[in-house]
Image (cartoon, grey):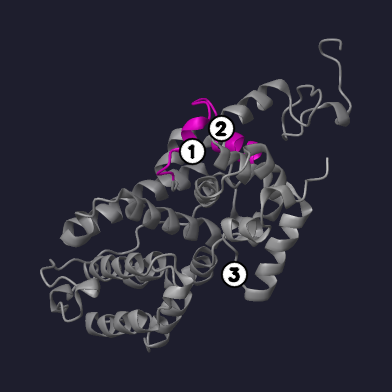
Amino acid sequence: MVKGCSYCSLCVCIIAGCVAPRHKGSLCSAHKKRLAKVPLAVRLTRAARRWLLSLIPCDVTDFVRRFSRLRQNVPLLIVSALLKERDAVTGMLGRLPDLNNVTAAQLQAALASAKASAKPRRLTNKQAAQRGLKRTASAVAATHSDASAVAATHSDEYEVTSQLAKCTCPWPCTVIKDAASFKLCVARVKLLDEAISAACPAWGQDTKAYVHSFLRWKLIIGELCSTPVLQRCMDWSDVSLEDLKIGSLDQDEYLDSFPATWTAEDVSLFSFHRKDWAMFLPLFACLFGEVVQKTQADPDALVRLVESEAFGEAAKAHHERYGIGAHPYTLVKGFGAPESWPLAKP
């Protein structure tokens, strides 16, 4: 090759924006080396990028749909963000006559209804679900001006602390239109979480950082997805990797596998072949991380499976039949032993 010449589209790395030549594969040498260094969960996420719209967890899609309606009601916003059981959230909202004017007593009754309607068969762990309800109730109570009226009247698994300071926490964010407003939203959501933590010991003393980052991530995603497409002027190349880490759900530190000089756009293009999905990488990597933990199979065979048309068809069929995304491990398990797995077409 002559330096400075134009390559045909068939000879260039498939990562958008990269004009480096490729040889024996779809990636240039630099991106091929990067792919070899990232965790297997990230490789699987990248391999399944064409099917990911059918794999988004239903609690995320449901929350995004209702975000604009609940945006100014922080207690309900937090409830619907933290509860993952679809029927529980639906039952709770159905028992609230006026979503714009909810008292602590009404919320208490609605949360009790949520507990009653939750179906453990749809959850990975019943006790974890109950603990989630407990944390949710405590955190939401802290956002009410009459929070002290909330009493611990339920079982230990669903205890709502009565020693809560009075606190009002309005939704602090503005519409995300560009990188600057994105960074501002990330900072304000962090302050909101800290304000709730200060008002509610049960929430603030939770030693699992995951529940806090999960709440922050969902609030940011809700705000981001609620912005009309025509109003967005988002340039993800202006969002650094550090900014992305602060706002994303990355407890397993998948983003640390990328160079510090990369931007959110670089991460998204590498992982999804689109510019605007970097915030979703830790979510999907976490899901595929469970596949890695529970599946004793050759890593390359796993990659070929999730990249195959058969895996994509299975994901789409599950979504069409049940209206929710399947967990990747459920799909992998459905293909049986590794020796029977279909191969991705070259």
- Relative to the observer, which residue lies in front, 72 or 120? 120
- Relative to the observer, which residue lies in front, 223 or 282? 282
Along the polypeptide, which appears first: circle 1 or circle 3?
A: 1
Q: Using the rendered view, name the quadrant where residue 76 is placed.
A: bottom left
Q: Quick check: is 189 in the magenta stretch?
A: no
> Could you say whether the residue bearing mark 3 is in a helix, strand or loop?
loop
Q: Amino acid at mark 3?
A: Ile
Along the polypeptide, which appears first: circle 3 or circle 2?
A: 2
What residue appears at the point 77 percent right and 29 percent down from the top-left corner?
Answer: 13
Q: Using the rendered view, name the quadrant where residue 235 is placed.
A: top right
State the quadrant of the C terminus: top right
The boundaries of the magenta stretch are: 250-272
Residue 324 is labelled as: 3
Residue 300: percent from left, percent from top? 67, 37
What residue appears at the point 35 percent right and 51 percent down from the top-left corner?
Answer: 210
Q: Amino acid at mark 2?
A: Val
Q: Amino acid at mark 1?
A: Tyr
The residue tagged 2 is: 38
